[in-house]
Amino acid sequence: MKRVVASIALSSLLLFSCNKKKEEKEEAAVYPVTSPIAMDTVIDKEYVAQIQSVKNIEIRAQEKGFLEKIYVDEGQFVRQGQTLFRIMPQLYQAELMKAKAEVEQASIELKNASTLASNNIVSKNERAMAKAKLDAANAEAKLAQIHLSFTDIKAPFSGIINRIPRKLGSLIDEGDLLTSLSDNSNMYSYFNVSEPEYLSYQMHAADRGSNEVSLLMANGELLPEKGQIQTIEGEFDNETGNIAFRAKFPNPNKLLRNGETGKVRMTLPLRNALIIPQKATYEIQDQKYVFVIGKDGVARSKNIKVAYELPDVYVIGSGLAKNDKILLEGVQKVKDDQKVQTKLQDPKKVLNSLKLKAE
């Protein structure tokens, strides 16, 4: 029994000795550190976008009557000038016939008045009144012709017919919606940009190269065609602090439709951006931290705010200064307030060799 106890005690002593040596070895480890680097760069930023047809209008009735004909179907492509609907025209045809008859009557009266006036049988005022009556009749006939033309609703431009809410035989009132028409050959994409990003975009035009943008569609794929930023609205939204941009995308395959959503991917220039390797950070409850090494060699955790994420690196929004020394590797091994031995590495060389995340 004494031998068993002695054996256990000896094993415990050996295990304690090994653990102590291991801790001493870890404490003696040399950890690489580096500093944030300030440099000019560009980022690809994605913005939620609303997609609209360059031309998208509502087709409404201009006259009252029964919907007599529907010449098109929902989703159909129509040409400019093509007849879409007909509202019962009989009433307006009768009005036009009546107006034409009045024009003919006024013409005869003017002819007679002209003959009588030339023979001094009636005064010239009688002829002038007959002329005015004819002019009024012509105006009524023209108005009747316009009303009749409104019973045939035609496409003002080529495009795609959308939903047709009213069915054949429906009683249509003036102003009722018949359908809408979209020209999808080109599409507008509207997206909101924050004030700092707007200023960077406007002030560093030479750095961004062009106004070209890409469109990430709802299925996660990029639209093959590139777009161009055309306009920026005149004022900021006081509630959101954003300003609206508009980009125009060609749509030769008619893939995009009015009302879609997507994400505009825009290149933004960054001046003196503070950049650190991603592998120098660790995360706790969605908050990112780094270990800052003080002059006393003690590692202290510090919360940072990431402004942008690039491949293998973060652009720092706040929490670090250019001269801070941060732990590059071993962030999962080092404890807060632990004194460590470090070796400084050139930030430029570190960026050139980035391949791995934090260990």
Image (cartoon, grey):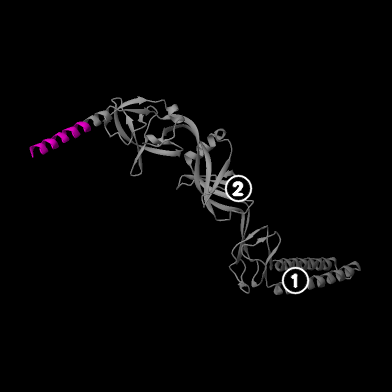
Q: Residue furthest left?
A: 2
Q: Earlier in the sequence, mark 1 or mark 2?
A: 1
Could you tell whether 23 is left or right of 158 in the image?
A: left
To which quarter of the image does residue 153 belong? Answer: bottom right
Residue 1's x, y, as percent? 8, 40
Q: At x 71% / y 74%, what residue is drawn?
A: 90
Task: Look at mark 1 in the image and give the residue it sits on.
Answer: 96
- Segment tinted magenta in the rendering: 1-19
Instruction: Give the vertical position of 197 relative to 179 (above or below).
Output: above
To which quarter of the image does residue 334 belong? Answer: top left
Residue 209's x, y, as percent? 58, 35
Q: At x 70% / y 62%, what residue is drawn?
A: 82
Residue nearest the observer in this picture, 310 or 11? 11
Can you tell which mark lies on residue 249? 2
Instruction: Give the vertical position of 250 relative to 44 (above or below).
Output: below
Amino acid at dot 2: Phe
Residue nearest the observer in this picture, 302 or 178? 302
Residue 134's x, y, as percent? 80, 68
The answer to whether residue 15 is magenta is yes
For disc 2, the neighbor class at 10 Å (few under 14, some 14 to 19, many from 20) is: many
Amino acid at dot 1: Leu
Local secondary structure at mark 2: strand
Q: At x 76% / y 68%, what residue is drawn?
A: 141
- How far apart are the alpha carbons under marks 1 and 2? 47 Å
Local secondary structure at mark 1: helix
